[in-house]
Image (tube, rainbow, N blue to C red):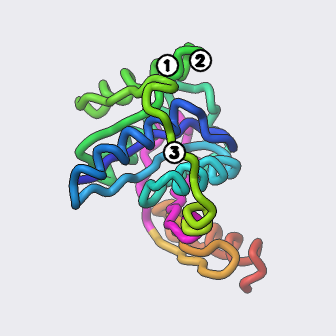
């Protein structure tokens, strides 16, 4: 069983998202075969909030990395979340409810409509989130965050996210997988840029 927890874009983990992670973990504790996967989209800062959520106990995470994705664009975020969730496969989708942010409060309904499946929206403070221990924080650094990259020439809104090649960098970014676009030339350019940026070539 896979539970996908949608995490809002940003460097800090939202309280309602922490409650959503805890809700998923409460379900996981009652079964032996549950994988809790985090999903977010946006700038590189999102990795910080994913690491915090992984320290709470989630198993792995997916980051759709694109600076063009606005953290307040519910339509684009719902499209990205639905596309990736469909690609990953899921049994349940959970997200934190954001009553104070009107645009983001639409995400559960928009994602549910795109997936044609219910999405559980967890209100803030409805499930007390745990405080991660130091060992849990250290362990979170070793958990997998896979990064998906939209094709550079694709419009963000309505763009399909189709992983092509996989690059694993175990030095400066351990346990990170980079998915590039399906055009071989563009993929090669991105790969070289990725390695050069980290002084691996």
Residue at 52%, 30% (x, y): give it.
16
Helix, strand, or loop for circle 3?
loop
Tell which circle, 3 or 2, labels the residue nearer the N-terminal end. 2
Residue contact at pointers 1 and 2, CB within 8 angstroms = yes
- Frontmost residue, 185 versus 93: 93
* Residue that badge 1 annotates: 105
Q: Quadrant of residue 95?
A: top left
| Inter-mark Cα distance, 3 to 2 | 24 Å
Please tell me the numbered disc located at residue 178: none
Residue at 44%, 25% (x, y): give it.
126
* Residue that badge 3 annotates: 130
Please tell me the numbered disc located at residue 101: 2
- Frontmost residue, 141 versus 130: 130
Residue 143 on the magenta segment: yes
| Inter-mark Cα distance, 1 to 3 | 24 Å
Q: Which residues are magenta?
A: 140-164
């Amino acid at each position: 069983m896979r539970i996908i927890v949608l995490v809002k874009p940003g460097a800090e983990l939202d309280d309602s998202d922490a409650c959503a992670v805890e809700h998923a973990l409460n379900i996981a504790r009652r079964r032996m075969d549950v994988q809790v996967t985090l999903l977010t989209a946006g700038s590189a800062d999102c990795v910080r909030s994913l690491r915090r959520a992984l320290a709470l106990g989630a198993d792995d995470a997916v980051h759709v990395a694109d600076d063009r994705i606005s953290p307040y664009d519910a339509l684009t975020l719902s499209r990205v979340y639905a596309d990736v969730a469909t690609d990953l496969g899921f049994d349940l989708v959970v997200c934190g409810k954001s009553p104070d942010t009107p645009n983001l409060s639409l995400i559960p309904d928009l994602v549910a409509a795109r997936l044609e499946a219910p999405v559980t929206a967890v209100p803030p403070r409805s499930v007390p989130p745990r405080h991660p221990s130091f060992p849990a924080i250290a362990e979170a650094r070793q958990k997998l965050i896979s990064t998906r990259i939209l094709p550079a020439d694709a419009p963000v809104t309505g763009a399909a996210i189709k992983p092509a090649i996989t690059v694993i960098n175990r030095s400066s970014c351990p346990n990170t997988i980079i998915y590039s676009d399906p055009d071989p030339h563009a993929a090669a350019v991105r790969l070289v840029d990725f390695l050069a940026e980290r002084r691996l070539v």
